[in-house]
Amino acid sequence: MIFVITARELRGLFLSPLAWTLLAVVQGLLAWIFLVLVDDFRNLQGRLAALDNAPGVTDLVVAPLFRVAAWVLLLLVPLLTMRLLSEERRTGTLDLLLSAPVGSMAIVLGKYLGVMLFLSSMVALVALMPLALAIGAPLDFGKLLTGLLGLLLLAGGFASAGLYLSACTTQPVLAAVATFGLLLLLWIIDVAGTGHGTVDSLFAYLSLPRHYDALLLGLFNSTDVIYYLLFIATFLGLTIRRLDDMRLRG
Amino acid sequence: MLVKNVMKGEMLVQVERLTRSYGDIRAVDEISFTLHKGQVLGFLGLNGAGKSTTMRMLAGVLAPDTGRITINGADLLDQPRQAKQAIGYLPDHPPLYRELTVDEQLHYSARLHGLDRTACRQALLRAKEHCGLVDVGQRLIGNLSKGYRQRVGLAQALLHDPPVLVLDEPTVGLDPMQLREMRELIRTLGRDRGVILSTHLLPEVQAACTHAQIMRTGRLVYAGDLADLEQRRCSTHLRVGLNVPPPTASLAQLPGIIRVEELGYGRFRLHHAPGAAPHQAVLERAGAEGWDLWEITPEHAGLEQIFVDLTLGEAPV
């Protein structure tokens, strides 16, 4: 049942120009950044050769690329998720799902899986660029993989928050603005966490990029992964509750 | 009791003391009713009477504040999956995705209701044939006219062959030809199912339903079969036209006449008790006294009038 909903979600996405435009914009922007980074790396190569333990191409091209990719996703995921439930509420198609013998959990998971498959294809396309370097340069595949995992988890976190806020309103634009605001807040929340007090370190812990940076450096720390999984589970749980609540409040 | 049940067909829907409020407004107030196989139940009422709210609760889209709904033996709250499987629901706006084709939409809906691929194909063919959609399978829903969308919505509700159909204003936006086909279809469907349809058009109930239920501000003010409603239609006044009319008072003294209404140009409306037949007395007197009678017509209280009386709360129930 979940996959039936996922399949329709994907079909709806790819039938709209929005998804294609998003893919094109992300790919175009990141390709440009990628080329700049590769160029920089080429210019630095002579000096790097003189260093012991010099940072490799993975550190100097892949990690910065993924850092930019995270920003691009922060900007674009809200646009992708804004219509998920708000549009269905507005046009009344949600009634079909609510009156079908399908639970709220299946509805939410189906939709989330649909967006995640789309975002995975986006991340896969981004990953093709550094992979192309493997032809002529020694790539650190471990770092590349943890970086990709980080990007995917981050996108998953963004999407879950977007899905929840999309369930809270019937106006897609409102959902997008709210999602963007929430994500940006969680992104920069660690500016309040520069000190060493308990509250400060809590803020720092909550911030989204902190856990991502570690993964980009090739540090696979299970707490970072769990942070994102908890983040996703929380918002999916909230969305399910919200959907149940809709039946109660009408 | 047993005999009665057999005659009525098995009970498909049972609603007990259903209540639902939006904030301070009580949209549905303790209504109870049942639906049996072979019944087409017409839900009548003005806008805002609580018809749609009741139907949304039946379909499981909206949770009731209190009360119980049992569908085909399954409680809607305790066993929602079984109950919902037994219902085909068409909301007032058909829930259709504009970017899908008719076939894609129907396929999606069939899969949502747990049909596997082969069953899906057959269900699609059957439903499209039923609803006259065979030629538009490849068309985008966004490009269809309102009438066609309504039909796609109905086809969607029929796909999984549910024993209960809940149709919220199924004939809105149809042209007269489609209207007739839709009513015919609903009557056919009602033979081996239970159908509930809401409308504020009275002729619709007369054309398609076996039973009628009237709601007013969240309460059920009338429930019964259509024959019973027709009973209330029996004639209650005569219209007569006289070239040489006598004074109104002498008309009022005719046996059986309760009240006389003057309509002008020698026309009068003579009110009498339901069931009484004073036409013979009128004819005899007119002949004897030379009133030169040129018209005498029994007038029915229109179903329309009964409906208005009931919905506005002027008639005793």
Image (spheres, coloured by chain):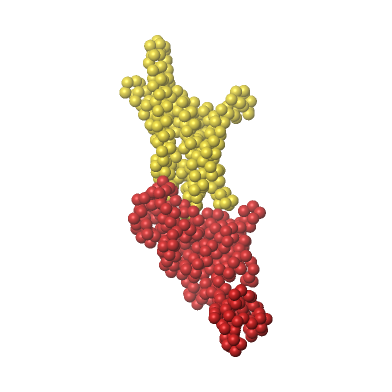
Chain colours: A yellow, B red
Compared to residue A186, the image places residue A42 above or below, namely: above
State the image coordinates of residue B16 (x, y, percent, origin top left): 58, 64
Q: Nearer the viewer, residue A34 or B139?
A: B139
Q: Residue at x 57, y 68 (%)?
A: B307
Q: Nearer the viewer, residue A186 or B32?
A: B32
Q: Residue at x 42, y 53 (%)?
A: B145
In this view, the residue farthest toward the front is B244
Q: Is residue B294 among the parts visible in the rendering?
A: yes
Compared to residue B271, the image places residue B66 above or below, namely: above
Q: Nearer the viewer, residue B214 or A115?
A: B214
State the image coordinates of residue A104 (x, y, percent, origin top left): 50, 49
In this view, the residue farthest toward the bottom is B288
Q: Quadrant of residue B124?
A: bottom left
Q: Nearer the viewer, residue A94 or B234?
A: B234
Q: Residue at x 55, y 54 (%)?
A: B62
Compared to residue A83, the image places residue A196 above or below, namely: above
Q: Residue at x 61, y 63 (%)?
A: B216
Q: Quadrant of residue A51?
A: top left
Q: Is residue A102 among the parts visible in the rendering?
A: no
State the image coordinates of residue A151 (x, y, percent, origin top left): 45, 31
In this view, the residue farthest toward the right is B249
State the image coordinates of residue B99 (x, y, percent, origin top left): 41, 46
Q: How many marks on residues? A: 0
Compared to residue B299, the image places residue A103 above or below, namely: above
